[in-house]
Image: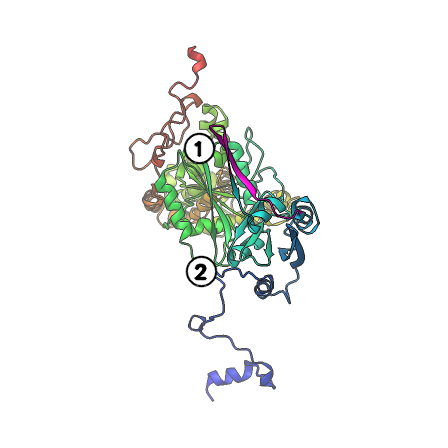
Amino acid sequence: MSFKDLLSSLFTYTPENKETYNFNLVEDINTKSYPDSTIGNTENKKTKIFPSVTVNSDYLKTKYNLLINSDIIFRDFILNARGKQYHALLIFIDGMVNTEIMNEFILEPLMMRNKNNSFDGGQNRVIAEAVANNITVRKVKKFNLPNYISSCLVPQNAIKQVSTFEDCISGINSGNCALFVDTLDIAFDIEVKGFKQRGIEKPSNEIVIKGPHEAFVENIRTNTSLIRRFVNNENLVIENLSVGNITKTTCGICYISELANEDLIAEVKFRMNNLDVDSLLSAGQLEQLISDSNNLNTPQLISTERPDKAASYLLDGRVIILVNGSPYALITPGILSDFLSSPDDKNQKALFSNFTKFIRLIAAFITLLLPGLYIAVTSFHQEILPTELLFSILASRANVPFPIIFELLVLETSFELIREAGLRVPSPIGPTIGIVGALVMGQAAVSAGIVSPILIIVVAITGTASFAIPDYAFGFHLRVYRFVFIFLGYLCGFLGIALGLFVYMVSMTDTKSFGVPYTVGISPLEHVKGSSYYLPAMEKREYRSGFLNAKKENKQGHISMKWKNT
């Protein structure tokens, strides 16, 4: 017996009754075909609705697994129309519809006897009347049951006729109800959504001082209404499309037709229409699916929960993407300066805004390079330090038995653990854990001689600077690459950091977001109107971002404050 067989006999469990365990995994799922399965198969032809309610009912009961599904409701009733009775069927999902609206505006007008459905039907419907040369001309239209139901019997604001089961099922899954009537080969998709949803609240991640205090929610229609309230223009276009072969998640592409570049709109549509995924559950997943690939993994789409920020970028000529079920909007394209900007910048005077933007720029460099520079100076370039400071550093490290790289990695890892723990624990004790954890662990580490006090100061400054980055994704990017520069500084000192920074900047300048250079305004060096990192005075913000090639270059008059010249 070989060693492998011996181990197999010792540790492999073989049931006594093998016939009980008859389930086997498919070795290669790609080689096995499932001809009856339609999940995710977009190439199947759409099935037409049958003129028999009974046949339609049996088909949908099979589709929805009605024998085991508990929340799918099939409501049979008799419909009255012009003195005749028809067998009708109403299908909806319990918990996703407003039952009061459905009872009052659908079932009651169709089932109960009233003036609309009880007259003899001898009349024709007048659809137009005109008077010419004292002669009255009237156009009439003969009785049509589908139009009669949708325009006369069902007093609901959103109702449309569908001819395929796929369109009907899509409406039911989104919270509508489907009405089938005998003798008709169409169904009525009626909007009666009533599922519970979160109300509009204050932004939790993008706090501003002078801006609006409203944030996006998980309902795409609420989000589009928030954007329209800010833009307030008929040229705002919101196109819907579905992403996901199984989930069919509704996404909205928003742009202002008079401003946005047609090529940018076409590129966004092309990428979203060519996604072959089974599910899409959040804006974060969509961001990864439509972003350009780059070596640095820098964020290329701006993610925001603020409708005022989204509207501001819309008016600049950009395209906004909304995902149903996600309280974040994606703004495309995104460039480097956008991730260091705050929505509050445009609400303050230019001097104050530019000061804070300068502080954020310093914070980005500190977050990325400070620990690496510290380890490079203390390991290779002690001569650049003042003698007193060098003696102070050496004295603080006299009782530390570990190399400086170990100290730095321990502190940086501990800081990241505290940051992550503060996010995951319940919100009332989150800040407490961050403060107490940092103080207790830092003091204990110094007292135990594991780390030096000056290194705690360096890590604390670095961590504080990382919180000054307005965009969470870009701040995360800097935090990750900070470890790269720590190792470069430890291995080669300033030379390693310089080489790493050179490669970093070259890779960043090579990155593009939807065809736009990521470092526009910095590289290439040519001047691009409206793309400066710093803001001019409010009355001088004349141009839209030049790299967008918007249809309208100017966003305000050359003399915007005309009251000064009158």
Instruction: Report whether residue 206 is seen.
Output: no
- Identity of the residue drawn at 51% across and 45% down: 452
Which mark, residue 315? 1
Q: Which residues are magenta?
A: 119-138
Residue at the disc numbered 2: 42
Q: Residue at x 37, y 42 (%)?
A: 264
| Lateral position of residue 548 relative to residue 465, left or right | left
**Do the CB atoms of the residues marked 1 and 2 lie less than 8 Å apart?**
no
Which residue is drawn at the image coordinates 36% and 36% (left, top)? 548
Q: Position of residue 504 (x, y in %)?
A: 35, 45
Label 1 environment density (alpha carbons within 10 Å; few <14, some 14–19, many ≥20):
some
Regarding residue 226, the answer to whether it shows in the image is yes
Amino acid under disc 2: Thr
| 294 relative to 118 in the view: left or right | left
Cα–Cα span, label 1 and label 2: 36 Å
**Which percent across, then down, holds residue 253?**
45, 43
Q: Please state which of residues 316 and 239 is positioned toward the viewer in this rendering.
A: 239
Residue at image coords 36%, 34%: 550
Q: Is residue 121 magenta?
A: yes
- Name the chief secondary structure element in magenta: strand
In this view, the residue farthest toward the bottom is: 1
Residue type marked 1: Leu
Question: Relative to 294, does residue 315 appear above or below in the rendering?
Answer: above
